[in-house]
Image (spheres, grey):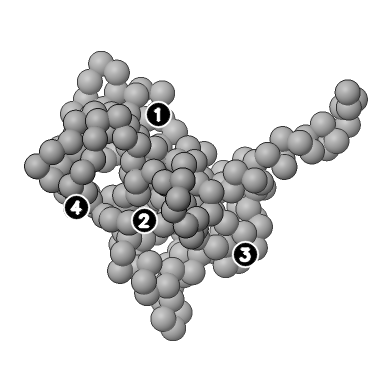
């Protein structure tokens, strides 16, 4: 489990295609990662296969590639990183599973005072889980939905601290991002689905 509070950014050193999917090696400031540890890389929970010398390697299986942007990653790309939450840590963001629900697209970017406003187009399955001032995760960053300017679009307000400590300030219209909806909204949707469909409730 994660919080969406990115604690480091890393740089992709190499990407290698394998029979099972892709292996990605990332340069990071983490000095004590161990094989088997979970790290959220741009919001996708991946398992560390090897670690050492300022780098760590993770693998994404073939089934993960179509539902993420990992297939587009190349050396030199910066990524947001977060290590798994310890049981004695503060939950400063919101509950983030590291399970990418969909890929969204940045459709607008606007400077507004000391904040950066980004509009993200969301697929319908995710859009219906998003509410104004609710939580959403974009490329691993826990954010508050600033507004819903049009159907299927969420507006996000990126403050100065977040711009300085994540990759979100680099985003431009046309860029694709990982989106994870609030897990509580997903459970509520599941619970009310029979009532919405008119199915008989056991």
Question: Does the rendering let one see residue 5?
Answer: yes
- Vertical position of residue 193 compared to residue 20: above or below: below
Instruction: Give the image location of residue 73, x and y in percent.
Output: 26, 40
Alpha carbon of mark 2 to alpha carbon of mark 4: how far? 13 Å
For disc 4, the marked residue is 29
Tag 2's secondary structure? loop
Instruction: Give the image location of residue 58, x and y in percent.
Output: 26, 33
Tag 3's secondary structure? loop
Residue positioned 59% across, 48% down in the render: 182
Residue positioned 35% across, 49% down in the render: 82
Alpha carbon of mark 1 to alpha carbon of mark 4: how far? 26 Å
Instruction: Give the image location of residue 202, x and y in percent.
Output: 88, 23
Give the left or right position of residue 53, taking residue 66 as reference. left
For disc 2, the marked residue is 6
Give the class, few, some or many, for how many residues have Cα within 10 Å of label 4's Cα (few <14, many ≥20): some
Foreground: disc 1 or disc 4: 4
Question: Which circle's residue, 2 or 4, is located before the other in the chain?
Answer: 2
Alpha carbon of mark 1 to alpha carbon of mark 3: how far? 29 Å
Please give the label number shown on residue 133.
3
Front residue of 114 and 45: 45
Question: Which circle's residue, 1 or 4, is located before the other in the chain?
Answer: 4
Residue positioned 57% across, 67% down in the render: 146
Foreground: disc 4 or disc 3: 4
Q: Quadrant of residue 195?
A: top right
Alpha carbon of mark 1 to alpha carbon of mark 2: how far? 21 Å
For disc 1, the marked residue is 64
Question: Which circle's residue, 3 or 2, is located before the other in the chain?
Answer: 2
């Amino acid at each position: 489990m994660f919080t969406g509070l990115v604690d480091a950014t890393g740089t992709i050193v190499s990407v290698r295609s394998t029979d099972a999917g892709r292996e990605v090696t990332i340069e990071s400031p983490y000095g004590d990662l161990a094989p088997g540890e979970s790290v959220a890389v741009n919001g996708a929970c991946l398992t560390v296969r090897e670690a050492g010398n300022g780098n760590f390697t993770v693998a994404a299986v073939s089934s993960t590639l179509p539902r993420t942007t990992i297939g587009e990653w190349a050396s030199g790309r910066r990524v947001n990183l977060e290590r798994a939450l310890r049981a004695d840590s503060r939950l400063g963001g919101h509950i983030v599973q590291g399970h990418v629900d969909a890929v969204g697209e940045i459709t607008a970017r606007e400077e507004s005072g000391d904040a950066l406003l980004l509009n993200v187009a969301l697929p319908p399955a995710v859009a219906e889980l998003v509410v104004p001032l609710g939580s959403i995760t974009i490329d691993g960053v826990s954010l508050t939905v600033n507004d819903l300017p049009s159907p299927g679009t969420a507006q996000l307000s990126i403050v100065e601290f977040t711009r300085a400590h994540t990759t979100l300030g680099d985003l431009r219209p046309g860029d694709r991002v990982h989106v994870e909806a609030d897990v509580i909204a997903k459970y509520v949707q599941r619970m009310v689905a029979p009532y919405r469909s008119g199915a008989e409730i056991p």
